[in-house]
Image (spheres, rainbow, N blue to C red):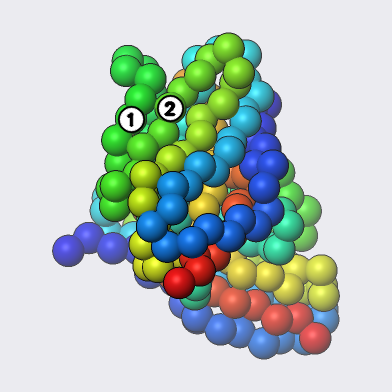
Amino acid sequence: DAEITQSPRHKITETGRQVTLACHQTWNHNNMFWYRQDLGHGLRLIHYSYGVQDTNKGEVSDGYSVSRSNTEDLPLTLESAASSQTSVYFCASSSGTQPNEQFFGPGTRLTVL
Amino acid sequence: AQSVTQPDIHITVSEGASLELRCNYSYGATPYLFWYVQSPGQGLQLLLKYFSGDTLVQGIKGFEAEFKRSQSSFNLRKPSVHWSDAAEYFCAVGAYESSDMRFGAGTRLTVKP
C-alpha cells in the first residue's frame, strides 16, 4: 500500500543546531507540503513543492528550507534551530494541479532546548 | 489569499447527541473545502470535501457538511455522535489556481458518556 512516512518521530535538539526532518511518500504524488502544528494555530504551511526542483514558501517559512531532488522525498531543514520552532511537524502529499485530498504522515515532534 | 475561521475551540457533546462544527472561509471565488479529523497522536484523515455541485456532501464515518455561499460557511454535522468521534477537527480551504490549502485552528470535540 502507498504511504507517507516521516522520520524521526521524535527529536530533541539544542538551539543553534541544524536539523533535518525526512518525509518520504510512495503515492507518486507531484505535490508535497510541510506544516507545523501549534496549539491555537492549527496547521500552518511552511514550504511546499509541486514537483522535482520546485519549492515555494508558505506562511511561516523563515528559518526553514526544503529541496526536492526526486518525486518521493521532501526533507525539511531547520538551518539554526530556535526554541520557537518547537512544534509538531507534518508532511503531506497530493496529486493534481488544483486543491485535492492531502495525505498526511504521522508527524514529527521536535523539541528545541 | 484564502483563509478559514473555526469559531469554536472546544465543544463537548453527549454520546448520541447531534453535532455541528462551524467553519467560515474567506475567498473571492468558489472555494475547494475540506474537513479533516485528527485523533490523538495521529496524522490527519480526510472526512469529506466540496469542489462543486450538490452543496450537501456526505463523508466517511456518518459525517456530512453543507456549503452555503451566502454565509461563506461549510459546517460539519453528524446526527448522532459516538465516543470514538472524540478528536480534533480541521476545516481547510483551497483556491483553484494552486494545490495548497489553508487550515483553520481546529475544534476539539469531547464526547461525554
For label 2, the crowd category at 10 Å Cα-Cα, with few meaning under 14, some 14 to 19 and many 20 or more, is some
User: Label 1 lies in what chain?
Assistant: B
Labels 1 and 2 share a subunit: yes
**Would residue A29 be found to the left or right of residue B90 on screen?**
left
Q: Nearer the viewer, residue B59 or B44?
A: B59
According to the picture, the residue beneath numbered tag 2 turns out to be B66
Would residue B111 be seen by someone viewing this image from the given angle? yes
Query: What is the three-letter code of the residue carrying label 2?
Result: Glu
> Residue A19: x percent and y percent?
65, 76
Q: What's the residue at 50%, 81% (across, down)?
A: A8
Q: What's the residue at 32%, 18% (across, down)?
A: B54
**Would residue A24 be found to the left or right of residue A82 on screen?**
left
**Which label was assigned to residue B87?**
none
According to the picture, the residue beneath numbered tag 1 turns out to be B57
Would residue A30 be seen by someone viewing this image from the given angle? no
Q: Nearer the viewer, residue A42 or B75?
A: B75
